[in-house]
Image (cartoon, rainbow, N blue to C red):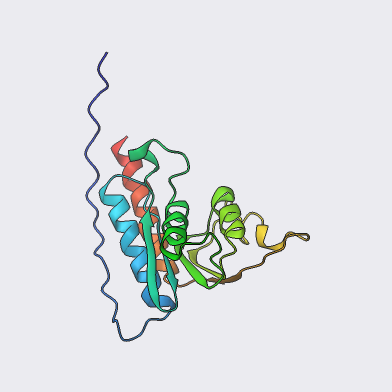
């Protein structure tokens, strides 16, 4: 029995951002993560993107690939953490910063803590599934041997609009 042909992706109405290379601040790296989220949308994946920077250089960039790979762990953060560990040749990412367009879920938050990443910057909080301050805070576990610095709200409105538009159009499609 043949599987039905997959539906084509809903066209993404959002444009990529082209941040200035002269100011490699949180907004710069979050814009790169936002661009990854747009790439996810164009592949009909939930538009979440992640970038990991270390000492001013991007060492990892990924977007959700859960549906295309049929892998429940293929979240942007998980893929980026794997890339970063390979780039540095070490699983310890103490000096790196993760930029992600939405607060990490329980799985990704746990991986972030286990990787000992130095800092996490996320655009949009998630009060239902976020685990770095939203629904709960794995970063605050009393007996954990690692804590990462958390910054929130960078490009929050843009990332919220992107996610809301994706799901609104998906509902219309069904």
Q: Is residue 174 visible?
A: yes
Q: Nearer the viewer, residue 146 or 50?
A: 146
Residue 38 in the image: x percent, y percent? 30, 57
Residue 91 in the image: x percent, y percent? 53, 59
The C terminus, quarter of image:
top left
Q: Is residue 130 visible?
A: no
Q: Residue 159 appears in which quarter of the rendering?
A: bottom left
Q: Compared with residue 67, is residue 166 higher up or lower down, i.e. above or below?
A: below
At 58% from the left and 55% from the top, the residue drawn is: 109
At 29% from the left and 38% from the top, the residue drawn is: 173
Drawn side of residue 94 relative to residue 167, left or right:
right
Residue 156 in the image: x percent, y percent? 45, 68
Drawn side of residue 77 relative to residue 62, left or right:
right
The N terminus, quarter of image:
top left
Taking the view exactly as shown, the residue that stands out farthest to the front is 89
Q: Nearer the viewer, residue 85 or 67?
A: 85
Q: Nearer the viewer, residue 5 or 115?
A: 115
Taking the view exactly as shown, the residue that stands out farthest to the top is 1
Taking the view exactly as shown, the residue that stands out farthest to the right is 142
Residue 55 in the image: x percent, y percent? 44, 78
Q: Compared with residue 92, is residue 12 higher up or lower down, i.e. above or below?
A: above
Q: How many marks?
A: 0
At 56% from the left and 63% from the top, the residue drawn is: 92
Q: Nearer the viewer, residue 23 or 58?
A: 58
């Amino acid at each position: 029995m043949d599987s039905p042909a997959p539906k084509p992706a809903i066209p993404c109405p959002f444009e990529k951002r082209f941040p200035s290379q002269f100011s490699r601040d949180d907004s710069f790296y979050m814009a790169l993560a936002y661009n990854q989220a747009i790439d996810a949308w164009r592949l009909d994946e939930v538009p979440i993107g992640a970038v990991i920077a270390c000492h001013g250089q991007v060492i990892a960039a990924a977007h959700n690939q859960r549906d295309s790979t049929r892998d429940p762990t293929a979240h942007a953060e998980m893929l980026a953490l794997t890339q970063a560990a390979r780039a540095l040749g070490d699983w310890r990412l103490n000096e790196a910063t993760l930029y992600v367009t939405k607060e990490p879920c329980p799985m990704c938050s746990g991986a972030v803590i286990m990787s000992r990443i130095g800092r996490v910057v996320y655009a949009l909080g998630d009060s239902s599934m976020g685990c770095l301050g939203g629904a709960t805070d794995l970063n605050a576990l009393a007996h954990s041997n690692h804590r990462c610095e958390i910054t929130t709200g960078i490009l929050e409105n843009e990332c919220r609009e992107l996610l809301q538009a994706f799901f609104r159009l998906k509902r219309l499609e069904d």
